[in-house]
Image (cartoon, helix red, strand yellow):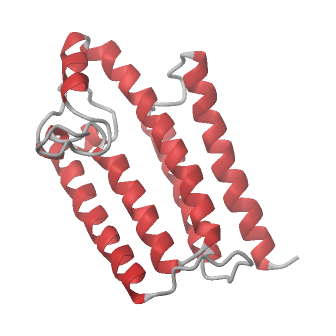
Amino acid sequence: MSVLYYLIVFTYSATLLMLLLVVSTYRRGSSRVWPPKSPVILAIGWIWYLSAFTAALWLSFFKSPLQMPLSDLPWKILGWTLIMVSIILGMWAVAAFRSIRRVSGGRVDTLITWGPYRYVRNPQYTSLMLLLLGITLVQNSFYFLLFSVLEAATFHMIALLEERELERIFGEEYLRYKRDVPRYLPRLKGGIA
């Protein structure tokens, strides 16, 4: 078997398993898996995600039979722009927590509504989705596009789980915040979400 085969099997089986796990958790109304209750579960989740991401990135260097028609320079420039915006947004979102324990979910004592959280409820997931889209455009890879779609679905389900938990913890305060602030994309001045 080739390296390509192993990368495909690992990337998509790990990604699908993660997606099924969070969908199952959401449907059962459970919070056993996410948001993580311990640093160990958080670390396992990140190792799992980063290993699938790394495999998908390696996979994107292989030519796929379904090469996307995006080889022009403007697509690559757009991709690199999205990657840079993603990095800046992600760093801003993490900085808004003002504490590693808050970022990791170990301390949930304050509803964060400043920094990028003034504009969107989930800037970290917006950042990750922009990163995936940017890499897809730069690499022009169908393999990475498929991975990105599966990961975007996973991030969305995780955001739903986290929002449900925040509703439980903060009650009406979070419900007001949820009504006023969109989930992923900021509202334009005219009020379009």
Q: How many marks?
A: 0
Residue 13 seen from this side: yes
Locate residue 53: give its quadrant.
bottom right
Residue at position x 46%, y 71% in the image: 135
The N terminus - image quarter: bottom right
Residue 51 seen from this side: no
The extreme right residue here reads 1
Task: Locate residue 72, reporting x and y percent.
Answer: 46, 87
81 shown above or below 112: below
The extreme bottom residue here reads 73
Residue at position x 37%, y 47% in the image: 125
185 shown above or below 4: above
Residue at position x 60%, y 31% in the image: 23
Locate residue 127: give its quadrant.
bottom left
The C terminus - image quarter: top left
Asked whether, in this view, residue 17 is left or right of residue 174, the answer is: right
Q: Nearer the viewer, residue 71 or 55?
A: 71
Asked whether, in this view, residue 32 is left or right of residue 38, the answer is: right
Task: Locate residue 129, reporting x and y percent.
Answer: 41, 55
Task: Locate residue 16, reporting x and y percent.
Answer: 67, 47
152 shown above or below 104: below
Q: Nearer the viewer, residue 134 or 59?
A: 134
Task: Locate residue 147, reporting x and y percent.
Answer: 60, 59
Asked whether, in this view, residue 71 is left or right of residue 82, the answer is: right
